[in-house]
Amino acid sequence: MPQEKNAGATHAFWLAGRQVTGEDSFDVTSPWDGRLVGTVGVPSDAQVEEAVAAAYAVRDEFAATPAHVRAAALDHVSKRLVERTEEIAQLISAENGKPIKWARGEVGRAVSVFRFAAEEARRFNGGEAQRLDTDAGGQGRLALTRRFPKGVVLGIAPFNFPLNLCAHKIAPAIAAGAPIILKPAPATPLSGLIIGELLAETELPAGSWSILPVSNDRMPALVQDERLPVISFTGSEKVGYAIMDSVPRKHCTLELGGNGAAVVLADFASDADLDWAATRIATFSNYQGGQSCISVQRVIADASVYDRLLPRIVAAVEAQVTGDPSDDRTDVGPLVSEDAARRVESWVDEAVSAGATLLAGGKRDGASYAPTVLTDVPASATLSCEEVFGPVLTVRRVDGEAEAFAAVNDSKYGLQAGVFTHDIQAAFRAHRALEVGGVIIGDVPSYRADQMPYGGAKQSGVGREGVRFAMDDYTYERVLVLTGLAL
C-alpha cells in the first residue's frame, strides 16, 4: 500500500492503511528515566473522520474478502513480528517501562495471537445446517446459519500490554472480516503503530484498518459515532461502564479490572508445594510492575499452611530484582508514571495507618514502587476493595475451603482466580463456586493463553476476548432457509 513518509523523528499514524502525519504531535517518554522515546503525530478531526468514513465504506467489501486473503495477511504479521522481536521488545520496554524479558514474552504472545487469528479466519463461518422437517410445516426445508460482521469495530487498548492488547483488538476483527479503528493508549502508542507497519505490507483493502493515537478526551466522539456499532474496550471499570452506559444500543465488549486472588488449600502442604506457590505468587504479583488485571493481589491461605507459606512469600518477593527495565536481570521495573506510583504509595500508607502489617517493600522512588507484602489489611481499606495495579500483595489466613472461596467472592471484581490444590474434587468445587471468568488450578490467576476465552464476571466486564471468542462478539448469526429440497 502507498505510504506518505513522515519527516524528522515524528512517528506517523495509520489512516485507512496509509501512513500520515497530523498538524500536532506529542512526546512519548520513558517512565524509567524520562528520556524521549519518540514523537507521535496526532490525527486532526478531519483525519479521524476520513478514517471512520473509509472503514464504513469498505465494510461490505471487507466482509466478502476471501478467507485466504485475510488469513495470509494475519500470517504475514505473525511472521514479521518474529523477525522483529528484539526491536519491538526494546520499544515496549522503553515506552512502557516493562522489563525486557517480559517485553520479549509480550511479543511472543502477539505472534501467537495473529497466528491463531489466521487459523480461525480459515475455519470461521463455515455454516451450520439444520433440518427443519422435524415438523410437518418444515418439510423440504433446510436452515443454514452463518455469522456476518456487525460492522466497524472501535478498539480501545490500554498501556499495560501495548502490543498484545492491540493485537487482541485488530487480529480478531481482520479474521472476521470487520474493519477496525484502533485507538492505542496515549502513554504507549508506539508499539501499536508497529502493527500498522506490518499490516501495510499486506493486501488488505484500503480502509479496512486505521490506528489513530487520539487523546482520551476525544474518545467520546468516536464512541458515539453510529458508524462504529461494536466497541471493544480494555481498561478501567469506571471508563468501561461509562462507555457502555453512553451507548446502550451498541455492542460493547469490556475487559475491565480485577482483584486477583490466589487460594492455597490445606492439601497443598509439602515443602515443594509451598515453594512453588510462593515463587509463582511472588513473580506474578510483581510482573509488569503489578500492572496486569490478573496479577496476584490477594493470597488466601488455609490456616494449616499459612505459617509456613508466609515467610516463603516474603523471601520470594524480596528476591525480585528491581531496576532498569532494559537489563535482562530485572524482574520489576517502574510503573507507567510517577502519578501511578504515588497512588499505589497512598493506598499502602492508608492500609498501614488502618492497622495493616507491612512485611516487605512499601517504598517509592519516582515511578518505581518496591515489591510489597502486607498482612492484616482491613476489609474496608482501598487496597482490599479496589484493583491496586501495582506490585503489592496482601496475605490472609482462612479456615477451610468454604471460607477461602467466600473470601475470593467477597469482591466486586471477578476476572480470574488461582487455586493451589491437588484435589480434583476441590478443583471442580472451585469452578462451580468462584464468581470469576476463569479458574486456574495449581497456579496463580495470572495465567492466560491467548486462544482461550478471557473475561470476567461482576464488575470485571462483559464479553470475552481470545481470538475466536472475540470474533463471536464482532459478528452475528444470520439464518438462510432453503425450500423445496429433497432431504
Image (cartoon, grey):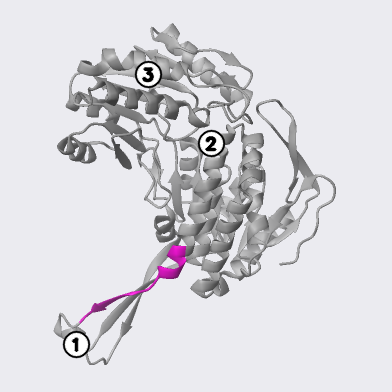
CA distance for labels 3 and 1 = 67 Å
Q: Which residue is mark 1?
A: 139
Read off the magenta span: 119-132
Contact, mark 3 vs mark 1 (Cβ under 8 Å)? no
Q: Which residue is painted at 29% across and 79% down in the image?
A: 143
Residue at mark 2: 102
Tell me, yes or no, if residue 392 can be seen here.
yes
Q: Quadrant of the N terminus?
A: bottom right
Whether residues under marks 1 and 2 lie with C-beta atoms below 8 angstroms apart, the answer is no
Residue found 64% across the figure and 18% down from its top = 366
- Read off the residue under disc 3: 313
Q: What amino acid does circle 2 point to? A: Trp
Give the mark, 2 or 3, whose residue is nearer the N terminus.
2
> Residue 55 is drawn in which quadrant?
bottom right
Q: Position of residue 164 (x, y in %)?
A: 53, 46
The type of residue carrying mark 1 is: Gln
Residue at the front extreme? 272
